[in-house]
Amino acid sequence: MSTFNDAKNLSVILDVKVDLTVRIGSCMLPMRDVVELGEGTVLQLDQLASEPVGLYVNDKLIARGEVVVVDENFGIKITQIVGDPA
């Protein structure tokens, strides 16, 4: 049951800014390869193109989804909300 105080307390945090990140994959490289990166370099990531991308809030996975194009911008279509593993 929600009370007025619960709603009031929640409204206090709704304007707090958080870091939102979409992760499409990663890779490990030795530093010698990192310093040699340049324009046109292609990095192979550890994720298949058909796999969903991760949506993170402050480095915590909260959802998965598909990359979409909206006008000329990238976006993410959320396909799964991730709950706390119990």
Image: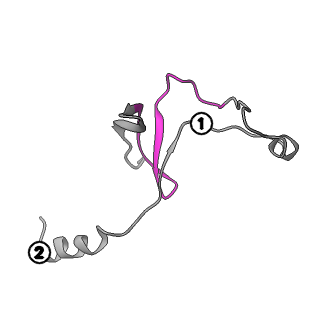
Q: How is the image coloured?
A: one colour
Part of the protein shown in magenta: 45-68
The residue depicted at 23 percent of the width and 71 percent of the height is 11
| Amino acid at the residue labelled 1 | Gly
In the image, taking residue 84 as reference, residue 2 lies left or right, namely left
User: Observer-nearest residue: 20 or 68?
Assistant: 68
Amino acid found under the numbered disc labelled 2: Phe
Q: In the image, is residue 6 part of the stretch drawn in magenta?
A: no
Relative to 71, 29 lies left or right: right
Work out whether residue 57 or residue 74 is closer to the camera in this orientation and state it: 74
Residue 4's tag is: 2
Residue 3 in picture, x, y percent from top left: 11, 72
The picture places residue 75, in percent across and down from the top left corner, at 40, 38
**Which comes before the other along the chain, label 2 or label 1?**
2
- Where residue 25 sits, quadrant-wise, is top right
User: What separation in Å lies between label 2 and label 1 (alpha carbons)?
Assistant: 43 Å
Q: Does the magenta stretch include residue 61?
A: yes
Element at badge 1? loop
Q: Which of marks 2 and 1 is in front?
A: 1
Above-or-below relation of 46 to 63: above
Where in the figure is residue 37, as x and y percent of width and height?
A: 79, 40
Which residue is depicted at the point 40% across and 66% down? Answer: 17
Total marks in image: 2
Q: Residue at x 74, y 33 (%)?
A: 41
Please identify the quadrant where the N terminus is shown: bottom left
Residue at the spot of label 1: 25
- Compared across the picture, whether 26 is left or right of 38 comes to left
At 29% across and 67% down in the image, what residue appears? Answer: 14
Circles 2 and 1 in contact, beta carbons < 8 Å: no
- Rendering coords of residue 48 (x, y %): 57, 24
Disc ID at residue 58: none
